[in-house]
Amino acid sequence: MMDWLRHLWSAPGQALSDLFWSIATTNLTLAVIGALLLAALVVGYFPLLRWFPVIGQYVAAARLASALLACLLFFLIGFRISDDRAEAKSLRLKLAAQQIDLDAANDAAKKADEARAELAQQAEQDQQRISDYAEQLKKRPNGACILGPDDFDRLRDGR
């Protein structure tokens, strides 16, 4: 409750106007205006009611009221439709932005999976080279010495 009051206090024009239009375009408000329009149309345009003395004096006022209520009803319905369309457009734009973010995240995840698979393959190749080198070292006469006879020959020749 306090957040609503704080919001109302911080931007009184915007909050009050939003409150007014949200109340003015509710189903209840439109139904009440529609019922008043129907009553004004019955009093103003039903042929036998103008001959009753109690109702007859209100026929002209009812016709004017029916025209004004029809204009008001059409205006409020139009405002509500345009407000709903603007909100739907805003939601579509927000959804499109989220879809772009989701696509980017999926692309990044796909690239990360590809990189992970490439690194796993590279690690497997490196492990195979290490295993091959370890086998080569085991074949040498002195396993602790990493230098072979051809290495000493190379050193003596100065290569």
Image (tube, helix red, strand yellow):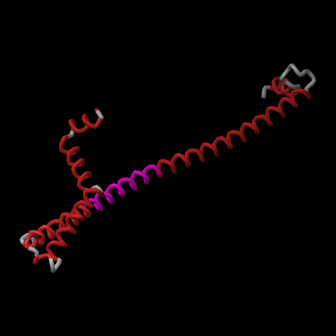
- Residue at the far top in the pictured view: 144
Residue 8, image x, y percentages: 23, 39
- The span picked out in magenta is 79-98
Decide whether residue 80 is among the magenta residues. Answer: yes
Determine whether 93 is above or below 46 in the image.
Answer: above
Residue drawn at the location 91% of the way across and 21% of the way down: 142
Horizontal arrangement in the rendering, residue 57 relative to residue 85 (left or right): left
Quadrant assignment, res 46: bottom left
Residue drawn at the location 20% of the way across and 36% of the way down: 9
- Residue at the far front in the pictured view: 53
Residue drawn at the location 26% of the way across and 51% of the way down: 22
Decide whether residue 35 is among the magenta residues. Answer: no
Chief SS of the magenta region = helix
Q: Which quadrant holds the C terminus?
A: top right
Residue 66, image x, y percentages: 16, 69
- Residue at the far right in the pictured view: 141
Residue 104, image x, y percentages: 51, 48
Residue 155, image x, y percentages: 81, 24
